[in-house]
Amino acid sequence: MSISAVLRNSRTRALCVLVVLRKSVRSFYTYKMAEKPADYLSTNGFESKTPFLIGVAGGTASGKSTVCQRIMEKLGQQHKEHTERRVVCISQDSFYRSLTAPERLRAERGQFNFDHPDAFDDKKLLATLKDILAGKKVEIPEYDYISNSISNRTNTLYPADVVLIEGILVFYFPEVRDLFHMKLFVDTDSDTRLARRVPRDIMERGRDLEQVLNQYMNFVKPAFEEFCLPTKKFADVIIPRGADNLVAIDLIVQHISDYLKKNPSEVLLTGGSSISDSPQRSSKGGRPH
Ligand SMILES: Nc1ncnc2c1ncn2[C@@H]1O[C@H](COP(=O)(O)OP(=O)(O)O)[C@@H](O)[C@H]1O
Ligand SMILES: Nc1ccn([C@@H]2O[C@H](COP(=O)(O)O)[C@@H](O)[C@H]2O)c(=O)n1
Protein backbone atom coordinates (compact mmCIF):
# COMPACT_ATOMS: atom_id res chain seq x y z
CA MET A 1 0.00 0.00 0.00
CA SER A 2 1.41 3.49 -0.95
CA ILE A 3 2.06 6.13 1.71
CA SER A 4 -0.77 8.30 0.30
CA ALA A 5 -3.14 5.31 0.50
CA VAL A 6 -2.11 4.71 4.13
CA LEU A 7 -2.64 8.41 4.92
CA ARG A 8 -6.01 8.39 3.12
CA ASN A 9 -6.99 5.29 5.05
CA SER A 10 -5.93 6.63 8.42
CA ARG A 11 -7.65 9.99 7.66
CA THR A 12 -10.80 8.07 6.80
CA ARG A 13 -10.46 6.08 10.04
CA ALA A 14 -9.86 9.27 12.04
CA LEU A 15 -12.93 10.83 10.43
CA CYS A 16 -14.94 7.72 11.30
CA VAL A 17 -13.73 7.93 14.91
CA LEU A 18 -14.70 11.62 15.01
CA VAL A 19 -18.14 10.89 13.59
CA VAL A 20 -18.62 8.08 16.11
CA LEU A 21 -17.40 10.33 18.93
CA ARG A 22 -19.66 13.20 17.84
CA LYS A 23 -22.55 10.78 17.51
CA SER A 24 -22.04 9.38 20.97
CA VAL A 25 -21.56 12.86 22.45
CA ARG A 26 -24.75 14.05 20.72
CA SER A 27 -26.69 11.00 21.81
CA PHE A 28 -25.36 11.51 25.36
CA TYR A 29 -26.76 15.06 25.39
CA THR A 30 -29.93 13.96 23.65
CA TYR A 31 -30.40 11.33 26.35
CA LYS A 32 -29.82 13.85 29.13
CA MET A 33 -32.06 16.48 27.56
CA ALA A 34 -34.77 13.96 26.80
CA GLU A 35 -34.67 12.73 30.39
CA LYS A 36 -34.79 16.19 31.89
CA PRO A 37 -38.40 17.23 31.23
CA ALA A 38 -39.62 14.07 32.98
CA ASP A 39 -37.77 15.04 36.14
CA TYR A 40 -37.94 18.81 36.15
CA LEU A 41 -40.54 21.41 35.30
CA SER A 42 -38.90 24.39 33.66
CA THR A 43 -40.73 27.69 33.93
CA ASN A 44 -39.17 31.11 33.27
CA GLY A 45 -35.69 29.84 34.01
CA PHE A 46 -36.76 28.11 37.23
CA GLU A 47 -37.16 24.42 37.73
CA SER A 48 -39.29 22.63 40.28
CA LYS A 49 -38.37 19.05 40.98
CA THR A 50 -40.62 16.11 40.23
CA PRO A 51 -42.30 14.73 43.38
CA PHE A 52 -41.43 11.36 44.89
CA LEU A 53 -44.48 9.27 44.02
CA ILE A 54 -45.54 6.48 46.37
CA GLY A 55 -48.24 3.95 45.50
CA VAL A 56 -50.14 2.30 48.37
CA ALA A 57 -52.11 -0.80 47.35
CA GLY A 58 -53.99 -3.46 49.31
CA GLY A 59 -57.41 -5.04 49.63
CA THR A 60 -60.51 -3.14 50.61
CA ALA A 61 -60.45 -1.94 54.24
CA SER A 62 -56.88 -3.19 54.67
CA GLY A 63 -56.01 0.20 56.16
CA LYS A 64 -54.50 1.97 53.13
CA SER A 65 -56.02 5.37 53.98
CA THR A 66 -55.22 4.92 57.67
CA VAL A 67 -51.56 4.09 56.87
CA CYS A 68 -51.35 7.21 54.67
CA GLN A 69 -52.94 9.31 57.44
CA ARG A 70 -50.43 8.00 60.00
CA ILE A 71 -47.55 8.81 57.66
CA MET A 72 -48.89 12.35 57.14
CA GLU A 73 -49.39 12.81 60.90
CA LYS A 74 -45.93 11.55 61.80
CA LEU A 75 -44.42 13.89 59.23
CA GLY A 76 -46.39 16.79 60.74
CA GLN A 77 -48.31 17.46 57.51
CA GLN A 78 -51.90 16.86 58.59
CA HIS A 79 -52.51 20.28 60.13
CA LYS A 80 -50.62 22.34 57.58
CA GLU A 81 -52.39 24.53 55.04
CA HIS A 82 -52.87 22.59 51.80
CA THR A 83 -50.60 25.02 49.94
CA GLU A 84 -47.85 24.43 52.54
CA ARG A 85 -47.85 20.62 52.57
CA ARG A 86 -44.71 18.84 51.39
CA VAL A 87 -46.44 15.46 51.58
CA VAL A 88 -49.93 14.95 50.14
CA CYS A 89 -52.23 11.99 49.62
CA ILE A 90 -54.91 11.14 47.07
CA SER A 91 -57.16 8.13 46.42
CA GLN A 92 -57.60 5.99 43.33
CA ASP A 93 -61.34 6.09 44.10
CA SER A 94 -61.35 9.63 42.64
CA PHE A 95 -60.74 7.94 39.29
CA TYR A 96 -63.77 5.67 39.13
CA ARG A 97 -65.31 6.15 35.68
CA SER A 98 -68.84 7.51 35.26
CA LEU A 99 -71.48 4.82 34.84
CA THR A 100 -74.04 4.39 32.06
CA ALA A 101 -77.74 4.56 33.08
CA PRO A 102 -78.16 0.73 33.28
CA GLU A 103 -74.88 0.45 35.23
CA ARG A 104 -76.13 3.11 37.67
CA LEU A 105 -79.27 1.05 38.33
CA ARG A 106 -77.17 -2.06 38.94
CA ALA A 107 -74.85 -0.13 41.26
CA GLU A 108 -77.82 1.04 43.36
CA ARG A 109 -78.76 -2.62 43.90
CA GLY A 110 -75.17 -3.58 44.77
CA GLN A 111 -74.85 -5.45 41.48
CA PHE A 112 -72.06 -3.48 39.85
CA ASN A 113 -68.47 -4.68 40.10
CA PHE A 114 -66.50 -1.71 41.53
CA ASP A 115 -63.53 -3.99 42.16
CA HIS A 116 -62.89 -4.81 38.50
CA PRO A 117 -60.20 -2.79 36.65
CA ASP A 118 -62.84 -1.75 34.07
CA ALA A 119 -64.60 0.28 36.77
CA PHE A 120 -61.73 2.80 36.71
CA ASP A 121 -60.80 5.53 34.25
CA ASP A 122 -57.17 4.44 34.09
CA LYS A 123 -56.37 6.92 31.28
CA LYS A 124 -57.45 9.83 33.47
CA LEU A 125 -55.53 8.41 36.42
CA LEU A 126 -52.39 8.11 34.28
CA ALA A 127 -52.75 11.63 32.84
CA THR A 128 -53.27 13.11 36.31
CA LEU A 129 -50.25 11.30 37.76
CA LYS A 130 -48.14 12.52 34.83
CA ASP A 131 -49.29 16.10 35.52
CA ILE A 132 -48.41 15.65 39.20
CA LEU A 133 -44.96 14.35 38.22
CA ALA A 134 -44.54 17.36 35.94
CA GLY A 135 -45.01 19.58 39.00
CA LYS A 136 -48.45 20.87 37.96
CA LYS A 137 -51.28 21.87 40.27
CA VAL A 138 -54.16 19.45 39.62
CA GLU A 139 -57.83 19.18 40.56
CA ILE A 140 -58.74 15.84 42.19
CA PRO A 141 -62.45 14.97 42.05
CA GLU A 142 -64.22 13.85 45.22
CA TYR A 143 -65.91 10.46 44.91
CA ASP A 144 -69.40 9.99 46.34
CA TYR A 145 -70.03 6.37 47.43
CA ILE A 146 -73.73 7.11 48.01
CA SER A 147 -74.48 8.19 44.44
CA ASN A 148 -71.72 5.89 43.09
CA SER A 149 -70.34 8.78 41.07
CA ILE A 150 -67.76 11.55 41.00
CA SER A 151 -69.24 14.55 42.83
CA ASN A 152 -69.03 18.04 41.40
CA ARG A 153 -66.56 19.02 44.13
CA THR A 154 -62.83 18.83 43.55
CA ASN A 155 -59.82 19.31 45.81
CA THR A 156 -56.83 21.25 44.55
CA LEU A 157 -53.59 19.30 44.84
CA TYR A 158 -50.72 21.78 44.99
CA PRO A 159 -47.23 20.70 43.90
CA ALA A 160 -45.57 18.78 46.75
CA ASP A 161 -42.33 16.90 47.37
CA VAL A 162 -43.95 13.55 48.13
CA VAL A 163 -47.29 12.33 46.77
CA LEU A 164 -49.01 9.19 48.08
CA ILE A 165 -51.79 7.55 46.09
CA GLU A 166 -53.75 4.74 47.68
CA GLY A 167 -56.18 2.33 46.06
CA ILE A 168 -57.05 -1.32 45.56
CA LEU A 169 -55.65 -1.42 42.01
CA VAL A 170 -52.90 1.21 41.89
CA PHE A 171 -50.39 -1.45 40.82
CA TYR A 172 -52.71 -3.13 38.33
CA PHE A 173 -52.25 -0.86 35.28
CA PRO A 174 -48.64 -1.26 34.04
CA GLU A 175 -48.25 2.34 32.83
CA VAL A 176 -49.48 3.68 36.17
CA ARG A 177 -47.41 1.17 38.13
CA ASP A 178 -44.23 2.21 36.30
CA LEU A 179 -44.62 5.80 37.49
CA PHE A 180 -44.10 4.97 41.16
CA HIS A 181 -40.78 5.58 42.84
CA MET A 182 -41.85 3.41 45.79
CA LYS A 183 -44.59 0.81 46.12
CA LEU A 184 -46.22 -0.24 49.40
CA PHE A 185 -48.74 -3.07 49.85
CA VAL A 186 -50.92 -3.10 52.96
CA ASP A 187 -51.45 -6.74 53.84
CA THR A 188 -54.30 -7.31 56.28
CA ASP A 189 -56.11 -10.65 56.55
CA SER A 190 -59.46 -11.02 54.80
CA ASP A 191 -61.55 -11.62 57.96
CA THR A 192 -60.26 -8.42 59.52
CA ARG A 193 -60.92 -6.53 56.30
CA LEU A 194 -64.49 -7.81 56.03
CA ALA A 195 -65.10 -7.06 59.73
CA ARG A 196 -63.97 -3.47 59.06
CA ARG A 197 -65.73 -3.05 55.76
CA VAL A 198 -69.21 -4.00 57.01
CA PRO A 199 -69.57 -1.24 59.64
CA ARG A 200 -67.75 1.29 57.44
CA ASP A 201 -70.02 0.73 54.44
CA ILE A 202 -73.15 0.83 56.60
CA MET A 203 -72.15 3.95 58.57
CA GLU A 204 -70.20 5.91 55.97
CA ARG A 205 -71.31 4.67 52.57
CA GLY A 206 -75.09 4.36 53.06
CA ARG A 207 -75.35 0.59 52.52
CA ASP A 208 -77.37 -2.08 54.35
CA LEU A 209 -75.93 -5.31 55.73
CA GLU A 210 -77.38 -7.59 53.05
CA GLN A 211 -76.07 -5.38 50.25
CA VAL A 212 -72.58 -5.19 51.76
CA LEU A 213 -72.35 -8.96 52.20
CA ASN A 214 -73.74 -9.74 48.73
CA GLN A 215 -71.39 -7.27 47.08
CA TYR A 216 -68.49 -8.72 49.07
CA MET A 217 -69.21 -12.34 48.12
CA ASN A 218 -70.11 -11.67 44.47
CA PHE A 219 -67.55 -9.04 43.51
CA VAL A 220 -65.15 -7.80 46.18
CA LYS A 221 -63.64 -11.11 47.28
CA PRO A 222 -63.26 -12.70 43.80
CA ALA A 223 -61.86 -9.48 42.30
CA PHE A 224 -59.41 -9.11 45.20
CA GLU A 225 -58.07 -12.59 44.44
CA GLU A 226 -57.97 -12.06 40.67
CA PHE A 227 -56.75 -8.47 40.34
CA CYS A 228 -55.46 -7.00 43.61
CA LEU A 229 -53.61 -9.80 45.40
CA PRO A 230 -51.42 -10.68 42.35
CA THR A 231 -50.08 -7.09 42.40
CA LYS A 232 -48.50 -7.67 45.82
CA LYS A 233 -45.43 -9.02 44.00
CA PHE A 234 -44.74 -5.53 42.62
CA ALA A 235 -44.43 -3.99 46.09
CA ASP A 236 -41.10 -2.77 47.45
CA VAL A 237 -42.43 -2.91 51.01
CA ILE A 238 -45.25 -5.11 52.36
CA ILE A 239 -46.92 -3.82 55.51
CA PRO A 240 -48.48 -6.73 57.44
CA ARG A 241 -51.40 -5.64 59.72
CA GLY A 242 -51.61 -2.15 58.18
CA ALA A 243 -51.68 0.80 60.55
CA ASP A 244 -51.08 -1.47 63.57
CA ASN A 245 -47.58 -2.08 62.24
CA LEU A 246 -45.86 0.86 63.89
CA VAL A 247 -42.38 -0.44 63.08
CA ALA A 248 -43.10 -0.54 59.33
CA ILE A 249 -44.76 2.88 59.42
CA ASP A 250 -41.81 4.38 61.32
CA LEU A 251 -39.36 2.94 58.78
CA ILE A 252 -41.32 4.42 55.88
CA VAL A 253 -41.65 7.77 57.68
CA GLN A 254 -37.90 7.78 58.31
CA HIS A 255 -37.26 7.13 54.63
CA ILE A 256 -39.56 9.96 53.51
CA SER A 257 -38.09 12.26 56.14
CA ASP A 258 -34.55 11.55 54.86
CA TYR A 259 -35.75 12.21 51.32
CA LEU A 260 -37.29 15.56 52.37
CA LYS A 261 -34.07 16.58 54.12
CA LYS A 262 -31.98 15.71 51.06
CA ASN A 263 -34.37 17.54 48.75
CA PRO A 264 -35.10 21.04 50.03
CA SER A 265 -38.46 22.28 48.80
CA GLU A 266 -37.32 25.64 47.33
CA VAL A 267 -37.49 25.91 43.54
CA LEU A 268 -34.07 25.36 42.01
CA LEU A 269 -32.31 27.71 39.61
CA THR A 270 -31.84 26.10 36.18
CA GLY A 271 -28.78 23.87 36.19
CA GLY A 272 -28.57 23.99 39.98
CA SER A 273 -28.97 20.29 40.55
CA SER A 274 -27.83 17.15 38.79
CA ILE A 275 -30.19 14.64 37.19
CA SER A 276 -28.85 11.93 39.47
CA ASP A 277 -30.27 13.77 42.51
CA SER A 278 -33.80 13.33 41.20
CA PRO A 279 -36.07 10.36 41.98
CA GLN A 280 -35.58 7.18 39.98
CA ARG A 281 -38.37 4.76 39.18
CA SER A 282 -38.28 1.75 41.46
CA SER A 283 -38.69 -0.57 38.47
CA LYS A 284 -35.36 0.64 37.08
CA GLY A 285 -31.89 0.63 38.58
CA GLY A 286 -30.51 3.17 41.02
CA ARG A 287 -33.48 3.48 43.30
CA PRO A 288 -33.05 6.11 45.98
CA HIS A 289 -34.43 3.95 48.77
N1 LIG B 1 -55.43 -0.79 62.58
C1 LIG B 1 -56.73 -0.57 62.63
N2 LIG B 1 -57.43 -0.90 63.72
C2 LIG B 1 -58.75 -0.70 63.78
N3 LIG B 1 -59.48 -0.17 62.77
C3 LIG B 1 -58.84 0.17 61.65
C4 LIG B 1 -57.44 -0.01 61.52
N4 LIG B 1 -57.08 0.40 60.30
C5 LIG B 1 -58.20 0.83 59.70
N5 LIG B 1 -59.26 0.70 60.50
C6 LIG B 1 -60.65 1.04 60.18
O1 LIG B 1 -61.05 0.16 59.12
C7 LIG B 1 -61.80 0.87 58.15
C8 LIG B 1 -61.06 0.79 56.83
O2 LIG B 1 -59.80 1.43 56.96
P1 LIG B 1 -59.21 2.29 55.79
O3 LIG B 1 -57.91 2.85 56.25
O4 LIG B 1 -60.22 3.26 55.28
O5 LIG B 1 -58.95 1.15 54.73
P2 LIG B 1 -58.75 1.24 53.14
O6 LIG B 1 -58.29 2.62 52.81
O7 LIG B 1 -57.76 0.18 52.85
O8 LIG B 1 -60.11 0.92 52.57
C9 LIG B 1 -61.95 2.30 58.65
O9 LIG B 1 -63.19 2.42 59.31
C10 LIG B 1 -60.81 2.45 59.63
O10 LIG B 1 -61.10 3.36 60.66
N1 LIG C 1 -69.45 3.26 44.35
C1 LIG C 1 -68.57 2.44 44.96
C2 LIG C 1 -67.20 2.53 44.71
C3 LIG C 1 -66.36 1.67 45.36
N2 LIG C 1 -66.85 0.77 46.23
C4 LIG C 1 -65.94 -0.15 46.94
O1 LIG C 1 -64.87 0.57 47.49
C5 LIG C 1 -63.75 -0.27 47.61
C6 LIG C 1 -62.48 0.52 47.38
O2 LIG C 1 -62.31 1.44 48.42
P1 LIG C 1 -61.49 1.03 49.73
O3 LIG C 1 -61.45 2.31 50.52
O4 LIG C 1 -62.23 -0.04 50.44
O5 LIG C 1 -60.14 0.60 49.27
C7 LIG C 1 -63.90 -1.36 46.56
O6 LIG C 1 -63.68 -2.60 47.17
C8 LIG C 1 -65.34 -1.21 46.06
O7 LIG C 1 -66.07 -2.37 46.23
C9 LIG C 1 -68.19 0.69 46.48
O8 LIG C 1 -68.65 -0.16 47.28
N3 LIG C 1 -69.03 1.54 45.84
Image (cartoon, rainbow, N blue to C red):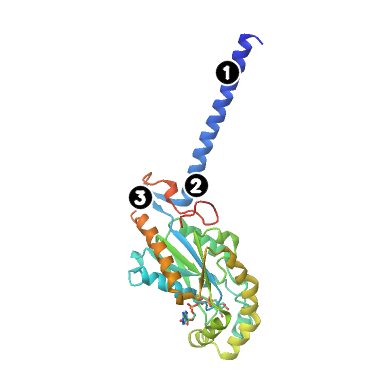
Mark 2 C-beta closer than 8 Å to ligand 2 = no
In terms of image quarters, where does ligand 2 lie? Answer: bottom right
Q: Position of residue 20 (x, y in %)?
A: 57, 30
Q: Residue 154, can we see it? A: no
- Residue indicated by mark 2: 35
Q: Residue 276, can we see it? A: yes
Q: Position of residue 285 (x, y in %)?
A: 53, 51
Within 10 Å of disc 1 (Cα), the crowding (few <14, some 14-19, many 20+) is few
Q: Say if mark 2 contacts mark 3, CB within 8 Å.
A: no
**Which quadrant holds residue 216?**
bottom right
Q: Position of residue 86 (x, y in %)?
A: 37, 63
In this rendered view, identify the residue nearer to me: 163 or 7: 7
Determine the secondary structure under disc 3: strand
Mark 3 C-beta closer than 8 Å to ligand 1 = no
- Residue indicated by mark 1: 11
What is the spatial separation of the Cα atoms under label 1 and label 3, in whole angstroms? 46 Å
Q: Where 64 falls versus 281 (above or below)?
A: below
Q: Which of labels 1 and 3 is toward the front?
A: 1
Determine the secondary structure under disc 2: helix
Q: Is residue 253 left or right of residue 207?
A: left
- Residue indicated by mark 3: 268
What is the spatial separation of the Cα atoms under label 1 and label 2, in whole angstroms? 35 Å
